[in-house]
Image (cartoon, rainbow, N blue to C red):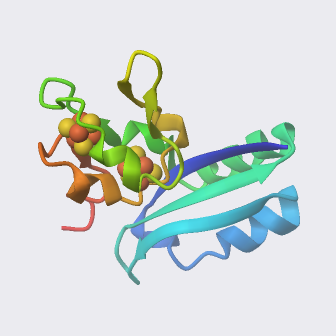
Amino acid sequence: MYSKILSLRFPKDIVNEPITVNLVKEFDLSFNILKATIYPRKEGIAVLELSGHRKNFQKGVRYLKGLGIKVESIGQDIKRDDDVCFQCGACTAVCPTGALYIKRPEMEVVFESEKCSACEWCVSACPARAMSVKFNKGLLD
Ligand code: SF4
Ligand code: SF4
């Protein structure tokens, strides 16, 4: 089983397509929608965990891209400003996926963007405002 958290940016002309149904029926993939902001006749964005056989996963992503959807690993949208982060560890207490954790014995706060689900809990938990989520800013303005 292959699984990855992806952000999908939809052009406005296809937001009404039965895309998730096709992912299940045509490619035998399962998905878990973590976040979605899609308005009729406007661009939209969704964050989902897509799972299945690796080959089907790749076919499914090709299908999405063929529809004009921009598909990216969610890690490309969540950033930590390492110049600002002072390693306090507060974010690790709220991160539900283990993307932020304390590496021992170094006691270093590590951010593994591949595990991030874009819940944004760390953004408000961080006293230094080091964490930022950029994917839904600007697209729907
Ligand atoms: S947005 Fe922050 S708290 Fe949420 S999963 Fe990603 S790193 Fe963890
Ligand atoms: S809460 Fe902010 S400052 Fe503290 S370790 Fe996490 S990212 Fe760094």
Most extreme residue toward the top is 106
Q: Return the residue nearer the eye: 134 or 123.
A: 123
Residue 82 location in percent, x, y? 21, 25
Residue 114 location in percent, x, y? 53, 36
Q: Residue at x 17, y 29 (%)?
A: 86
Q: Is residue 69 above or below residue 25?
A: above
Work out which quarter of the rendered image holds the C terminus and state it: bottom left
Q: Residue at x 34, y 43 (%)?
A: 78
Q: Is residue 67 left or right of residue 95?
A: right
Q: Is residue 97 above or below residue 76?
A: below
Most extreme residue toward the front is 105
Q: Is residue 63 above or below residue 10?
A: above
Q: Residue at x 40, y 15 (%)?
A: 106
Q: Is residue 54 left or right of residue 83?
A: right
Looking at the rendered structure, the number of numbered marks drawn on it comes to 0
Q: Quadrant of residue 120?
A: bottom left
| Residue 54 visible to an observer of this rendering | yes
| Residue 69 visible to an observer of this rendering | no
Ligand 2 in which quarter: top left
Q: Return the residue nearer the eye: 4 or 66.
A: 4
